[in-house]
Image (spheres, rainbow, N blue to C red):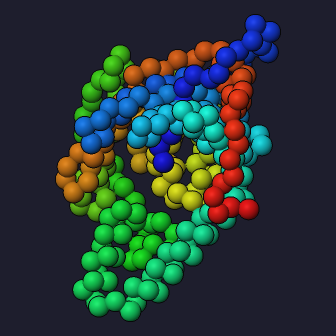
Amino acid sequence: MKILKTLLSLLLLAAPASAQGITMVQRETRNGQMTTNRMQMDRTHLRAETRNGTEQVAIVYDGGGDLARMLNLDKKTYVEMTRAQVQQMGQQVSGAMAAMQAQMANMPPEQRAMIEQMMRGRGAGMPGMPGATAPAKIEYRRSGADKVGQWACNKYDGYREQEKVVDVCAADPSALGLTAADFDVTRKLADFLKGLMPQAADQMSVLGTAEEQGFAGFPLKRTSYRNGAVESVSELTELRREAIPSGTFDVPAGFRREAMPGVQ
């Protein structure tokens, strides 16, 4: 689920005091289409904005309240998700997959094997996915040095078993002015989404050690591969510390709240 963040709504002249935070802008290319993603965060909040098809969307996470809001910026609507609701959605997905698996048990072996292979390719590790197994851990191997924009970085090739699935170019955090504490809120959001999207943690911008993520430093560029071909390329283009107005993490005025489908 890739949703990253951008500008907020209008601020009044009497806006409250700003808080120091971090703004990151990332360029992503997938299927020949380029998207600009923006993320702003402070120690307890995160807002990420991107384009989803033809619509501009955002996720806003309140780490203090442990609450996420999904905003459709074009339709001016939003839904709220608590941790309990996310877990409920994950259980519903698991139940649906278990029902599918029961149906597939009555299929001819060739048809069942074909469907299981297709499902594994699209969602390995999803709860209850027919034929799904937890994906093998990616092993990263140092492969040289490079530069992304103005920043020097170390290159790592990531292999799952014998297949190359990703490569990253990671920078020394001290050169970026970043600390591990800056990313506490992204770790908390990854944990929040884990019940619904087990791979969420792999797609979050974090600053980790080699023991935690397989390579040291902050990934400036990430290239993902599927079946030996490039699937997507994401690259950091802007990174700065700046005062983030408190209204950034609020629902913009005039937005209509909608119910989360299938969730109580």
Q: Quadrant of residue 189?
A: top right
Residue 104, compared with residue 23, is above or below; it is below
- Residue located at (27% from left, 83% from top): 111
Left or right of 201: which side holds 111? left
User: Which of 97 and 25 lies nearest the eye of the viewer?
Assistant: 97
- Residue located at (47% from left, 66% from top): 126
Residue 63, compared with residue 85, is above or below; it is above
- Residue located at (23% from left, 61% from top): 162
Q: Residue furthest left?
A: 228
Q: Quadrant of residue 252?
A: top right
* Residue 221 in view: no
Location of the C terminus (image quadrant):
bottom right
How far across and how far down the image is residue 65, in percent?
A: 77, 43
How far across and how far down the image is residue 99, in percent?
A: 51, 81
* Residue 130 in view: yes
Left or right of 138: which side holds 55? right
How far across and how far down the image is residue 205, in percent?
A: 50, 38
Residue 59, compared with residue 136, is above or below; it is above
How far across and how far down the image is residue 54, in percent?
A: 42, 37
- Residue located at (68% from left, 47% from top): 258
User: Which of 17 and 252 lies nearest the eye of the viewer?
Assistant: 252
Left or right of 147: which side holds 132? right
